[in-house]
Amino acid sequence: MSLLRNLYYALSPSMRLVARRVWYFPSDCWDSVAGKRDGMTPPKGMIYVGSGDFTEQGKNIRDLLVKYARLKPESAVLDVGCGIGRLAVPLTKFLNENGSYDGFDIVKKGIDWCNKRIAAKYPNFKFLHIDLKNDLYNDKTETEARSFIFPYEDNSFDCVVLTSVFTHMMPDDVDNYIGQIARVMRSGGKCLVTFFLVNDDILKRMEAGGTNFVFKYSYGDYLLMDDSVREANVAYREDFLQKLFDKHGLKKEAVYCGQWSNSDGYVNFQDVVVLSK
C-alpha cells in the first residue's frame, strides 16, 4: 500500500473530505477560472468516489448498464451508493420522461450537491441521504447497514446498480443489501454490481505479485487491504457471494473480471457481476 494511501486512511472520515479539498484546491481554482467544468460536474476536491475521470467513468457505467443490464430510456433506476452523481449526470441525457432515477448515499455533502445541481433541473431524479456508519466515509452514527431497509416499495425498479459499494461493506451488510435489492427489483429486472472477487486462482496470482491490488488480511469469506480501516477496500470470495445470491433468489447471469486482478477482457477496473430476478 502506498504511503499516501496510508496517510489518507490515518485521517478521520470527515478529515479525509477536507484533505481532498485542500489537495485539489489549486486544480479546482484553475478549472473554475478557465471554465473547464460544467454546472453538474463537482470540483475534484468534492469527489470521493474513486480515482479517474469523473465524467468518463460515469459514461462508462451508463454504457455497461445499457449493454449488460438492459437499461432503457424508460427504465426505473436505483443507484445504491450514488455518491456525488457520477452516474446520475450521464443518465440525465439518457432517461426520458417515462424513466426515473433514485439514488441514496451516506455522505451528505454528495447528496446536497446532487439535489442542488441535478434534481433541481430534472424532477424525475431523486436523491436521499441515509445516515449509516462506515469506517471510510461516516463515523458520526452507530446505525449499521446490516439493519437498513431501503426506503422504496417492493418491485419498484427495472435496474439496480452498485458501483464500488460492496467493496466498502462487511459481510452482514452485504447480505442485507442483497436481500433489499431482491425485494425492490421487479421480476425480470437486472442488477449490475461491482466487486473485488477472489478465488483460488486470483489468490495465487496475488501472492505472486501479479495483481494491481493486494488484500493482505484474510478473514475467510472476505479479505481486507487495510486492517485498521476495514471498510476501505474489501474483497469477497466468489463462493461466499454465490450463497448470498442463492439465499435471496437472485440469478448470477454473468461475471466480467476486472483490471485490478490483471485478468483478460476486463470491462471495468473492478469485477462486474450481472444479477437478475
Image: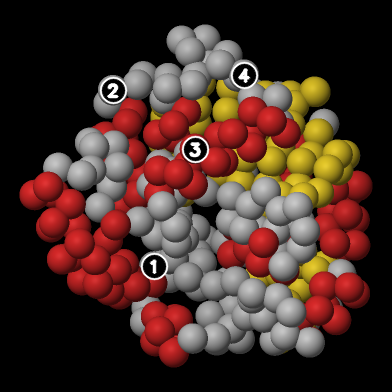
Residue 160 is labelled as none
Q: CA distance from mark 3 to mark 2?
A: 19 Å
Q: CA distance from mark 4 to mark 2?
A: 21 Å
How far is mark 2 from mark 1, CA to CA? 31 Å
Q: How is the image coloured?
A: secondary structure
In depth, the one of 59 and 88 nearer the eye is 59
Q: What is the three-letter code of the residue carrying label 3?
A: Lys
Cα–Cα span, label 1 and label 3:
32 Å
From the image, tell me which residue sits under label 2.
121
Residue found farthest to the left:
33
SS category of the residue bearing label 3: helix
Of label 1 and label 3, which has the lower sequence position? 3
SS assignment at label 2: loop
Amino acid residing under circle 2: Lys
Which residue does the image show at 42% across and 22% down from the upper left?
93
Q: Secondary structure at mark 1?
A: loop
- Badge nearest the viewer, 4 or 3: 3
> Mark 3 and 2 residues: CB-CB less than 8 Å, in contact?
no
Residue 270 figure quarter: bottom right
For the question of whether residue 164 can be seen, the reply is yes
N-term-proximal mark, 4 vs 2: 4
Q: Quadrant of residue 184?
A: top right
What x and y, as percent, mark residue 99?
A: 53, 16
Q: Are marks 4 and 2 in contact (CB under 8 Å)?
A: no
- The amino acid beneath tag 4 is Lys
Residue to which mark 4 is pinned: 72
The residue that disc 3 covers is 59
Left or right of 258? Residue 148 is left
158 in relation to 265, above or below: above
Query: Which residue is drawn at the image coordinates 61% and 86% (left, top)?
Result: 227
Q: Which mark is residue 140?
A: 1
Tell me the CA gap for discs 4 and 3.
15 Å
